[in-house]
Amino acid sequence: MRRLKRGDEAERASAPPDPPEVDADEDDLGPVWKALADPTRRRLLDALRAGPQTTGALCALFPKLARVTVIKHLGVLEDADLVVVRARGRERWNYLNAVPIQRIAERWIGPFEAHWASALLSLKSHVERPAESDAGGRP
Amino acid sequence: MRRLKRGDEAERASAPPDPPEVDADEDDLGPVWKALADPTRRRLLDALRAGPQTTGALCALFPKLARVTVIKHLGVLEDADLVVVRARGRERWNYLNAVPIQRIAERWIGPFEAHWASALLSLKSHVERPAESDAGGRP
DNA sequence: CATTCATGTTACTATATGGTGACATATGGA
DNA sequence: TCCATATGTCACCATATAGTAACATGAATG
């Protein structure tokens, strides 16, 4: 969790400021997985997909949660580089950074795609079958 | 429990006055995210990518962990439908099931992939206007 | 300068989870 | 039958995490 950086001079409080740089050199995907594990954080990212939001606006999207809870979730997302923050005045604009998600897609989803194409067929015959029988054996 | 799908044929022309609702469909792949959050379980799935293995063989692949730990991890993976088990005799063959991963790719990676493309565009505009940042501007 | 508003930080609690050893169950072979 | 092997369950502990209330900080406004 980073401290507030002083933003540029406030021109108006309705339009988001310029987006920060997309820091993308994140080789450790562990924090990303951890951040994505929580459904609230996934919904938070989903909300940010529509566009950058201030922290207060994000808190307003989750009336069931305390404001501090949302802030902590944002901190986890920021540590995972899934959210980048840029402060302008006393507002804090949260930007979605989808690059780590794309990393996951490249390094994880891709290799596993071969399985639901090939191994799924042999697996499908086992799924609805009661265990304990010896048909087919070790592939 | 299955949630309703919302088809969005109806386009909104401009920014609506009502606050944008966060689509909070907590689908059945919550356990999948939870299962994937742990690095040991990811390595377990990685080992199963080479082919089905008995529980004992999998335990042998993780000498640092107790056998019970591996079994519990396999239980989490099985609850998430990422691993399907079939018993043969007194052995237990664990099969990888990549379908939930594919569903994550469809429902998550896909929508976010469109975003990191636009994020790069935003980055470009940010680079072309380097003056408005606060870097070094703090008196 | 004082006030207000948006935001962040500091304890604190409850629950979840990873990890382990001891014990239990079932299967195959002597 | 008896015994070894493969696997799963139970009780337990340490840590992590989601969540909260109360308090603190910092910027805009009068």
Image: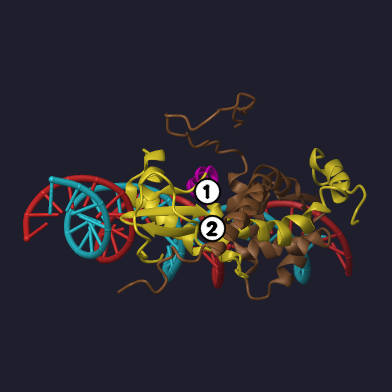
Chain colours: A yellow, B brown, C red, D cyan
The front one of A36 and B10 is B10
The front one of B122 and B89 is B122
The number of discs equals: 2
- Residue positioned 88% across, 50% down in the render: A118
Q: Amino acid at mark 2?
A: Leu
Q: Amino acid at mark 1?
A: Leu
Where are the magenta residues, as a range?
A: A38-50
Question: N-terminal of the two: label 1 or label 2?
Answer: 1
- The location of residue A35, given as percent across then percent down, is 52, 57
Q: Secondary structure at mark 2?
A: loop
- The location of residue A129, given as percent across then percent down, is 82, 39
Separation of disc 1 and disc 2 at Cα? 8 Å
User: On the image, numbered disc 1 is attached to which residue?
Assistant: A45
Is residue B111 shown to the viewer in this render? yes
Q: Describe residue A55's horizontal placement relative to residue B56 as left or right.
A: left
Mark seen at residue B123 = none
Which quadrant of the rendered structure holds the C terminus of chain B?
bottom left
Q: Chain of mark 1?
A: A
Q: Describe residue C2's horizontal placement relative to residue A119 as left or right.
A: left
- The location of residue B125, given as percent across then percent down, is 57, 58
Q: Is residue A84 magenta?
A: no
- Residue positioned 75% across, 45% down in the render: B99
| Quadrant in which residue B91 is drawn | bottom right
Is residue B94 shown to the viewer in this render? no
User: On the image, numbered disc 2 is attached to which residue?
Assistant: A82
The answer to whether marks 1 and 2 mark residues whose Cβ atoms lie closer than 8 Å is yes
Q: Is residue A44 magenta?
A: yes
The front one of A133 and A102 is A102
